[in-house]
């Protein structure tokens, strides 16, 4: 996988037609990281169920019909886990260290995650007040042929799908 930022739009080369790019606010680079896998992309809304007794007829009783209703509650998201082959880029590690070293509130970033297919953006998501919660690399074996994987888990406060 390679990145060329010689023009205003970065040019990506990968072994696949699918990849994700991450751009953090305040960064001078066109793209901070490219990933081949994203796990935990989950957005749900709680259901609030409540029950009331109405004046309507219920069975043989003259009144007291039970009515159940459902309303939308709080929206929730899970943390994102992004995976890529190990690179020489220090952007993710540096971000993780800044948060770890304190004053994490000021180190949160707004991020845009773009999903590409065939080199064209297909979907774009904006995350607000994002910060890395975990940084991991795969186990290393000198006799192995596996690619070293860099993994970062990101927590965030806001989530919105925006136009690609």
Image (cartoon, helix red, strand yellow):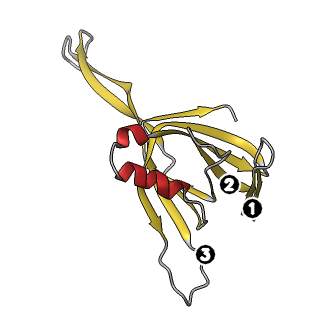
Horizontal arrangement in the rendering, residue 135 relative to residue 102 (left or right):
right
Q: CA distance from mark 3 to mark 1?
A: 15 Å
Tell me if 33 is positioned left or right of 155 in this view.
right
**Residue 85 % position (x, y):** 61, 67
Q: Are marks 3 and 1 in contact (CB under 8 Å)?
A: no
Helix or strand or loop: what does disc 3 sit on?
loop
Viewer-proximal residue, 56 or 116? 116
Q: Which mark is residue 134?
A: none
For disc 2, the marked residue is 19
Q: Please state the horizontal and vertical placement of residue 105, each as a whole percent of the image.
A: 36, 38
How many residues crowd around disc 3 within 10 Å: few (fewer than 14), some, or many (20 or more)? few
How far apart are the alpha carbons under marks 2 and 3?
A: 17 Å
Q: Is residue 12 above or below residue 48?
A: below
Q: How many marks?
A: 3
Residue 115, percent across and down? 66, 47
Residue 92, above or below 77 = below
Image quadrant for the N terminus?
Answer: bottom right
Q: Is residue 28 left or right of residue 45?
A: right
Whether the residues at callouts 1 and 2 have beta carbons within 8 Å, the answer is: yes
Comes first in the chain, label 3 or label 1? 1
How crowded is the residue under tag 2: few (<14 C-alpha within 10 Å), some, or many (20+)? many
Mark 1, residue position: 14
Q: Secondary structure at mark 2?
A: strand
Q: Which residue is mark 3?
A: 147
- Left or right of residue 147: residue 45: left
Q: Secondary structure at mark 1?
A: loop
Question: Where is 131 relative to 84, above or below?
Answer: above
């Amino acid at each position: 996988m390679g990145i060329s930022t010689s023009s205003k739009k970065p040019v990506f080369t990968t072994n696949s037609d699918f990849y994700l790019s991450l751009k953090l606010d305040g960064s001078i680079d066109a793209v901070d990281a490219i990933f081949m896998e994203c796990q935990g992309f989950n957005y749900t809304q709680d259901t609030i169920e409540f029950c009331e007794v109405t004046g309507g007829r219920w069975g043989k009783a003259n009144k007291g019909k039970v009515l159940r209703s459902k309303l939308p509650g709080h929206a929730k998201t899970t943390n994102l886990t992004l995976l890529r082959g190990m690179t020489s880029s220090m952007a993710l590690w540096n971000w993780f260290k800044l948060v770890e070293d304190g004053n994490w509130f000021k180190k949160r970033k707004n991020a845009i995650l773009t999903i590409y297919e065939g080199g064209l953006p297909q979907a774009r998501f904006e995350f607000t007040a994002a910060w890395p919660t975990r940084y991991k690399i795969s186990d290393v074996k000198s006799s192995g042929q596996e690619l070293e994987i860099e993994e970062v888990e990101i927590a965030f406060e806001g989530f919105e799908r925006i136009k690609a």
